[in-house]
Amino acid sequence: MSTGRESDWEGVRLHIVSGKGGTGKTTVAASLALALAADGHKVLLCEVEGRQGLARLFDVPQLPYQESRLATVPDGGEVYGLAIDAEAALLEYLELYYRLGRAGRALEKVGAIDFATTIAPGVRDVLLTGKVYEAVGRQGKPRARDRIVYDVVVLDAPPTGRIARFLNVNAGVADIARVGPIRHQADSIMALMRSPQTAVHLVTLLEEMPVQETSDGIAELREARIPIGSIVVNLARRSPLDPAGLRKAASGKLSRAQLVAALTSSGLACDAATVDGLLAEAAEHAVRVALEDTQRKRVAELGRPTYELSRLTDGVDLGGLYELAAELREQGMA
Ligand SMILES: Nc1ncnc2c1ncn2[C@@H]1O[C@H](COP(=O)(O)OP(=O)(O)O)[C@@H](O)[C@H]1O
Ligand SMILES: [Mg+2]
């Protein structure tokens, strides 16, 4: 049911969304999933941080370790959600490769699964990325075990501070296991992570710290040879004032008489206190816009395709996610 329009990321089958904590990774990942589904695609939206952020966002009960439908896009496709859990992924892996159905549960009882996923460094991330790889790799394979085949997978990923190590964890496995099935699996995952089928998008705000983290994250991903996608500027604001108005507001040179005239003609109060308050607010606004513009320039200097999402005034519910998805589609991200 393709509409024939091209997105900027044709050919990408694994979209990974990272960014500084709290900048809107989960929100952006969910909006991107809805935007991609609007082409009639079946999309899997995964989380790996054990926070049940997707269930909260889509207002559904806690997601089990099972793919369940989160949304059906009108005239489009579907978004499924999966909260990937390292313990469940390990049991599934043992079952799949060693047919350890009951034995696997016995291992769980004696705490071996907890041991493997919490004590051994990196094992968690190997399992989490392994599950993502499995979901992406279903396409083109016979429909084994009645699994849903997805056109594209979106991952609500760990924050920028950990993203390169997380995605690169299997390179370390490949160093340890020189041959055999584990080596083969690790190599296959790294091949996907470093292929043009993968794109890592970084969410930022127009503030110094998140922009710095975006810049650092790009450098680390580049070093790990993992393809960098776009930068998504979240909570972007556009000023109703033009550049000249902003300059005047910042330097306290907005015309008091004009403001009083405008208030009067709108039938609003224009006592001295109100006018002083409004002028002070305008000055603050202008200063903030100038700071944001400085950060916008730094983002542009990073040289990646950039999209902006506006701040939803009523918070982010399902309707809000559809609004953000539409913004992403208008700008060509999906
Ligand atoms: N575009 C937006 N407009 C309004 N609120 C937003 C927007 N994006 C994110 N938020 C809010 O900001 C908070 C953090 O977003 P979230 O997606 O959970 O960030 P992260 O996953 O990076 O921690 C949430 O309360 C979310 O509802
Ligand atoms: Mg989150």
Image: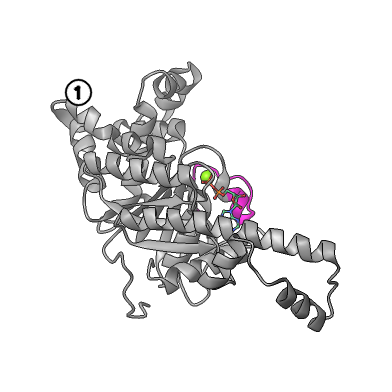
Q: Nearer the viewer, residue 193 or 248?
A: 248
**Residue at (63% x, 53% y) in the render:** 60
Residue that carries the numbered disc 1 in the rendered image:
176
Q: Is residue 95 visible?
A: no
Q: Which quadrant does the C terminus fall into?
A: bottom left
**Residue at (39% x, 35% y) in the render:** 162
Q: Is residue 89 visible?
A: yes
| Magenta stretch, main secondary structure class | loop
**Residue at (45% x, 30% y) in the render:** 87
Q: Is residue 181 above or below residue 68?
A: above
Q: Is residue 145 above or below residue 51?
A: below
- Indicate whether residue 156 is drawn in magenta: no
Q: Quadrant of residue 254?
A: bottom right
| Farthest top residue in view | 110
Report x, y in % for residue 76.
46, 73
| Farthest left residue in view | 179
Determine whether the residue tagged by mark 1 lies in a helix, strand or loop: helix
Q: Is residue 114 left or right of residue 53?
A: left
Query: How would you rate the neighbour count of disc 1 (Cα within 10 Å): few for under 14, some for 14-19, many for 20 or more?
Result: few
Report x, y in % for residue 61.
64, 48
